[in-house]
Image (spheres, grey):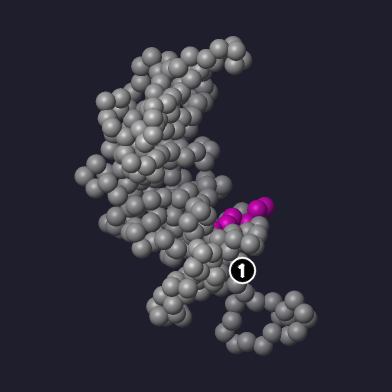
Amino acid sequence: EGSFPNRYLALFLSQDFGRSWKKIASNIFQFEWGDPSVEGFTEKTIMACLRKSDASPKNTFMDWDPNIDFVRSHNFFESSDIVIPHGNRFAIHHPYWFVAAMNPQEELEVKLHVSPDQGKSFRRSQFPYQLSERSYRVVDSKEGSVFVQVSHSERDTSSANVYMSGPGGHLYTLSLRSVVKDYRGLSDFEHINGVDGVYVANVIDNSQGDAAILGTLSSLFGADGAVTSMLPTKTKISFDKGAMWTDIKPPAKDSQGRVLQCDDCALHLNGKTAGYLGPVY
């Protein structure tokens, strides 16, 4: 609704299989149905990121906006309650709900709130360092714990640290530094399917020195914006759900059957940020 650049989304409801529709809310950015099996929720429970009706919109949809709140309604928005002030985005990784709320005093800074009970209650996440938090990516939550990649500054464009939570999803400890990511929201961090506790990740290879990394960054994109080369990376593997990481032992022979002769080498795998190659399974 509205006209460019002040367009916004409205939420419509149909209770007759789509034959008729009724607008129940305006200024919606995201919404999701609540699970009626959760205590206190009903079939009318909806959670959404909602902008205040008297607030002017930001320039782009991707801007953090202090006038957007994460709200909950149990009656199709006849009324609603603010659950997390300034909550601009949310993501669901069952049974966890994650909400990123901006700091109204610092518009580039956000805080992560986590619900372990499908949106019934939320707690603010706690990370081990007093660093600014600019963005988050939930990279895995398959085994009860949550792995979150946190960008602490605008320089974290090609890599960022990954933190691991306890059972409640809100207390975090550092698991692995400088995990590779890209502009599409993808991270080279994979849970090995069918094997509990085993994870594989690609990290920036700092052993080559800052000059080599900066040189690769400067040539990463060609004149037409196409990727021309890749960052120097190395692959790490964990067998204890991210507590310890080691190099992958190389095979005795290469793909051509030739014996590998190296004293201090490891096997390295391409991840999904490579673009033209498949991820690790």
Q: Residue at x 53, y 50 (%)?
A: 140
Magenta stretch: includes residue 193? yes
Please tell me in which quadrant of the rendered image residue 209 appears: bottom left
Q: Where is residue 26 shown, x and y percent of the image? A: 39, 23
Please tell me in which quadrant of the rendered image residue 159 appears: bottom left
Q: Is residue 249 above or below residue 107?
A: below
Q: Residue at x 41, y 61 (%)?
A: 157
Drawn side of residue 274 relative to residue 111, left or right:
right
Q: Which stretch appears magenta? A: 189-194
Which SS class for mark 1?
loop
Q: Residue at x 39, y 34 (%)?
A: 4
Image quarter in which the N terminus is found: top left
Q: Amino acid at mark 1?
A: Leu
Q: Where is residue 221 shown, x and y percent of the image? A: 49, 67
Q: Residues within 10 Å of mark 1 (few under 14, many from 20)?
A: some
Q: Nearer the viewer, residue 222 or 173?
A: 222
Q: Nearer the viewer, residue 248 or 75?
A: 75
Q: Is residue 165 above or below residue 6?
A: below
Q: Where is residue 233 shown, x and y percent of the image? A: 52, 71
Q: Which residue is mark 1?
A: 269
Q: Where is residue 257 shown, x and y percent of the image? A: 78, 81
Residue 246 seen? no
Q: Is residue 217 above or below residue 60?
A: below
Image quarter in which the C terminus is found: bottom right
